[in-house]
Image: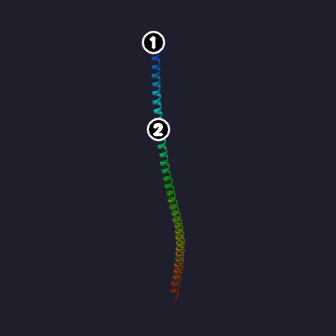
Amino acid sequence: LSTTESQRILEGYFMLVESLRSKERAHQTLLIDFQNLIEIYDRSRKMVKDGEEMTVRVREELERTEQSMRELHQKYDEKESALRTMEAQLNNARSEFRSKFGYINALEADRDELESRLNLVKINLKDQLVHLP
């Protein structure tokens, strides 16, 4: 082989080696990118799983809160019903008091009238006693 041919073969060999090195670097870059994608995918799956677990916990807490609210509402309704019953009893007691108080007032008025008549009778009796021989 001539020197020129040998030189061309060597240049071709170096170009081939350089091309292989370049492809090896590109292959390594692709491999690293692929590994990064796998890691990102794994992290995103973990985040989705964590999000699902959190959603379950939030739903459970929401259900507990709703149950608690229903229980509180029921207790409120019971207390409100008891309060209405007490108000009705109080109104009945007031009515009864007014009725009895009115009766007492009527008795007092009757007493006052009887006392007034008794006084008139006493005065008449005194007048009659004075005029007796």
User: Which one is in front, 66 or 26?
Assistant: 26
- Give x and y (percent) for residue 85: 53, 65
Q: Image height check: is 129 above or below 71?
A: below
User: Which one is in front, 36 or 94?
Assistant: 36
Q: Amino acid at mark 2?
A: Asp
- Give x and y (percent) for residue 103: 54, 74
Q: Earlier in the sequence, mark 1 or mark 2?
A: 1
- The CA span between labels 1 and 2 is 53 Å
User: Which one is in front, 18 or 8?
Assistant: 8
User: Which one is in front, 26 or 10?
Assistant: 10
- Give x and y (percent) for residue 104: 52, 74
Q: Nearer the viewer, mark 1 or mark 2?
A: 1
Q: Image height check: is 110 above or below 59?
A: below
Which residue is rendered at x = 48% and y = 40% of the image?
45
Report the residue marked by disc 1.
Answer: 6
Q: Please give the label number shown on residue 56.
A: none
Q: Residue lying furthest bottom in this view? A: 133
Q: Amino acid at mark 1?
A: Ser
Give neighbour class at mark 1: few <14, some 14-19, many 20+ (Cα, 10 Å): few
State how many labels appear: 2
Give neighbour class at mark 2: few <14, some 14-19, many 20+ (Cα, 10 Å): few
Which residue is rendered at x = 46% and y = 33% of the image?
35
* Secondary structure category for the residue under label 2: helix
Question: Which scheme is used to colour this image of the protein?
Answer: rainbow
Which residue is rendered at x = 53% and y = 73% of the image?
100
Report the residue marked by disc 2.
Answer: 42
Task: Examine the image and state in which quarter residue 106 appears.
Answer: bottom right
* Secondary structure category for the residue under label 1: helix
Left/right of residue 6 with respect to residue 114 in the rendered view? left
